[in-house]
Image: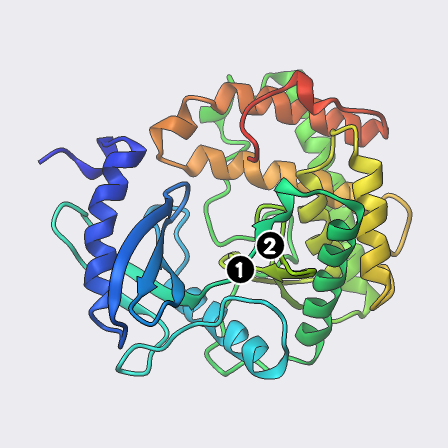
Amino acid sequence: MTDFYKLTVRGRARRLRRVALAALRHYDLDVTRVRLVTNDMNGIFRVDTADGAKRILRVCRADGLAHSLAEIRSEAAWLHALARDTDLLIPAPLPTREGDFVVTVAAPGVPEPRHCIVFSWVPGRTISKQMTGEAIAQWGALTAALHEHAAAFQPPPDFSIPSYDKVFPFNEPITLFDEANRELLPPARRAVFEAVLAKVQEAVDRLKASGEPMRVLHGDLHQWNVNVHRGRAGAFDFEDLMWGWPVQDIATMLFYSHGEARYGAVREAFRRGYTSRRAWPEQIPGEMDTFIAGRGLVLANDILLDTDPEWRAVVPRFFARTEARLRALLAGGAFDIKDWPLFDRE
């Protein structure tokens, strides 16, 4: 049998479907169909049931970028609280017959047991396919509502998620500046990356000294993780939860529009929606741009840790593109994303 990590994305997805089917045996669901949605990071499957309902099953990755069982259970805890306390469109976790929100199962051809979790379906189309001013404003208002709930959220004692109180928030090795990556970071590029590192660290230190408490952040609420349904925005993919400050959360979202011709309009519409519910969180001019640049560093480190051969093939191009983006942010100038095509999203 071919090694799992040498298979194509489609080949790995076929194996992960075995895991998905094994996980579903732990739920009281009359399943009629299981279909792959994506195998980009995790294995995401749509589950149809005899009562006509749709749900999402995530088969979590198990490599160096995987989230721990404690982190996945913490994600479920906040989503359960959001479903209980609000009417927001979010993926509520479904308990197993044993009453847990996470089940760990194994399947032939997949080398590690995988953590799996089932969520309710978030209807609609992603904002990425309908970037109108109104949809973007709804995205901003949704983000503000999540920040409001997070400010009052009382986590359970075993709640465990990363903290954005440092430049690299995730609990993973920081290899970006290692000697092994010297070819990817020649002196001029390294100087740019290190300048951004210093600016982000300064911004983090300023937030820590401000006295504003950290709260739970979605951590990855870009336009591919927000749906609009009948005039309402809904969020999904809460896997990257972290403690932090709202300005960091918004900067992470805006990173993916930075460099597009419509970026100014996107940012303004988002701000309009956000401030319809709460004050804009940027404390000093340029703070948002600093954390947008910081997202570039985080993704550059992540791509070095990703074992997927398709990602590995684009690492040099990714680093060149990231350098151009960081230079623009440091200088306060323009960056044209059309000149640096890679994927629809990093």
Q: Residue furthest right?
A: 285
Q: Nearer the viewer, residue 122 or 4?
A: 122
Residue 305 against residue 31 in the figure, above or below = above
Q: Nearer the viewer, residue 88 or 149?
A: 88
Query: How far across and how far down the image is residue 90, in percent?
Result: 56, 67
Query: How far across and how far down the image is residue 262, in percent?
Result: 79, 33
Query: Do we see residue 245 in this rendering?
Result: no
Badge 1 density bin: few <14, some 14–19, many ≥20, Cα 10 Å: some
Marks 2 and 1, how far apart at CA = 7 Å
Which residue is at a point 65% across and 61% down the rendered structure image? 230
Q: Nearer the viewer, residue 230 or 147?
A: 230
Which residue is at a point 69% across and 80% down the rendered structure image? 152
Query: How far across and how far down the image is residue 314, in percent?
Result: 47, 22
Query: How far across and how far down the image is residue 274, in percent?
Result: 81, 60
Q: Nearer the viewer, residue 138 or 199?
A: 138
* Sequence order check, earlier mark of 2 and 1: 1
Relative placement, left or right, of 275 versus 126 is right
Q: Which mark is residue 68?
A: none
Q: Which mark is residue 227?
A: 2
Question: Is disc 2 in contact with disc 1, using a CB cutoff of under 8 Å?
Answer: yes
Q: Quadrant of residue 332?
A: top right
Task: Give the amino acid at mark 1.
Answer: Pro
Relative placement, left or right, of 302 versus 21 is right
Q: Which residue is identified by label 1?
A: 123
Task: Give the amino acid at mark 2.
Answer: Asn
Which residue is at a point 57% across and 24% down the rendered structure image? 319
